[in-house]
């Protein structure tokens, strides 16, 4: 396994694999890897002859009062996990290696980014698109893998790939959950024992939404009101950022549930902002 901070080394190694007609699979991450990330790596390993993973806590996707400084970092453990998955290449750039002092070009998606997390985290998806575009240019993968837990991010990246004619396929893999249903996230590490229990309210509220929709309830307002009620009951100290029922393609809110919709929410459990979502029919 090659591990490098150097863009040139990554380009050369990926270039050699390409010359050997190996399909290049790419999993961009911010490290603090868990089973969710590893499911993306496993999918890449299955489908591609050469697997690259990037580990970079991207400062420009964090707001000024967000957790960039405290974001969990454990490179040695991540390296061990990736080695065990048979990864070929880890790209582990420094901040200055990615962003020159005079860096001044950004990539911004302006439609899907208006909703859900885009509303409460202004500039977040601009930072994500910019770093992912750079990583795509450096690695030049055939397939890039993203998790459905960040549903909006995956949709925005797909749109960027289409609109900017990147020559690669984006694959979105299912959410990996703990046994009790909590979606795996690097931020779960922040939770105290009590908060970890409270955090289950996200998944429970989505399961309630699913049950209601299956039961024939088609008013989004009713579903959202019941999800809020469940969260208030199960985790009285949780602070709801948003709960929305949206069109899974456009991410616009829907009033009447017809066909497939996405229920998505962000909730603060203590200081930790967690997100989750579920496709409902
Ligand atoms: O999902 C993440 O971990 C990040 O947003 C990503 C895609 C690696 C970009 O920094």
Image: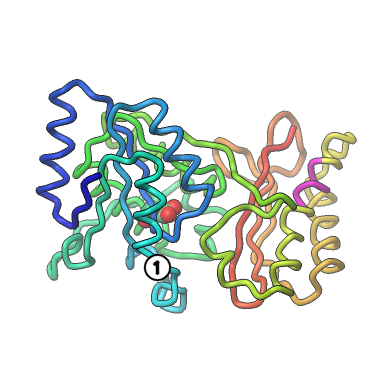
| Viewer can see residue 165 | no
Q: Which residue is mark 1?
A: 73
Our reading of the magenta stretch's main secondary structure is helix
Closer-to-camera residue (221/266): 266
Instruction: Give coordinates of residue 12: x percent, y percent.
Output: 10, 40
Residue 273 magenta-highlighted: no
Which image quadrant: the N terminus? Answer: top left
The residue positioned 59% from the left and 64% from the top of the image is 188
Closer-to-camera residue (205/191): 191
Residue 207 magenta-highlighted: yes
> Magenta residues, as a range?
205-210
Instruction: Give coordinates of residue 37: x percent, y percent.
Output: 47, 47
Instruction: Give coordinates of residue 208: x percent, y percent.
Output: 83, 48
The residue positioned 85% from the left and 50% from the top of the image is 222
Q: Is residue 33 above or below residue 85?
A: below
In this figure, which colouring scheme has been used for the structure?
rainbow
| Viewer can see residue 212 | yes
């Amino acid at each position: 396994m090659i591990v490098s901070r150097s863009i040139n080394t990554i380009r050369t190694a990926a270039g050699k694999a390409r010359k050997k007609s190996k399909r290049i699979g790419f999993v961009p991450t911010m490290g603090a890897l868990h089973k969710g990330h590893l499911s993306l790596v496993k999918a890449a390993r299955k489908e591609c002859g050469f697997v690259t993973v990037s580990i970079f806590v991207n400062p420009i996707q964090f707001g000024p009062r967000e957790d960039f400084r405290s974001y969990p970092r454990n490179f040695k453990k991540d390296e061990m996990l990736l080695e065990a998955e048979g990864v070929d290449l880890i790209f582990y750039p420094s901040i200055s290696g990615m962003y020159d002092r005079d860096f001044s070009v950004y990539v911004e998606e302006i439609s899907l980014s208006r909703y859900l997390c885009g509303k409460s985290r202004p500039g977040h998806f601009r930072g994500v698109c910019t770093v992912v575009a750079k990583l795509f240019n450096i690695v030049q993968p055939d397939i890039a893998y993203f998790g459905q837990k960040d549903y909006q991010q995956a949709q925005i990246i797909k749109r960027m790939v289409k609109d900017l004619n990147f020559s690669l396929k984006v694959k979105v893999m299912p959410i990996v959950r703990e046994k009790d249903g909590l979606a795996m996230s690097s931020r779960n590490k922040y939770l105290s024992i009590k908060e970890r229990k409270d955090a289950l309210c996200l998944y429970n509220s989505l399961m309630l939404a699913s049950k209601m929709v299956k039961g024939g309830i088609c008013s989004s307002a009713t579903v959202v009101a019941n999800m809020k009620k469940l969260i208030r009951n199960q985790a009285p100290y949780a602070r709801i950022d948003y709960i929305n029922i949206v069109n899974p393609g456009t991410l616009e809110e829907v009033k009447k549930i017809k066909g497939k919709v996405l229920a998505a929410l962000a909730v603060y459990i203590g200081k930790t902002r967690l997100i989750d979502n579920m496709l409902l029919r």
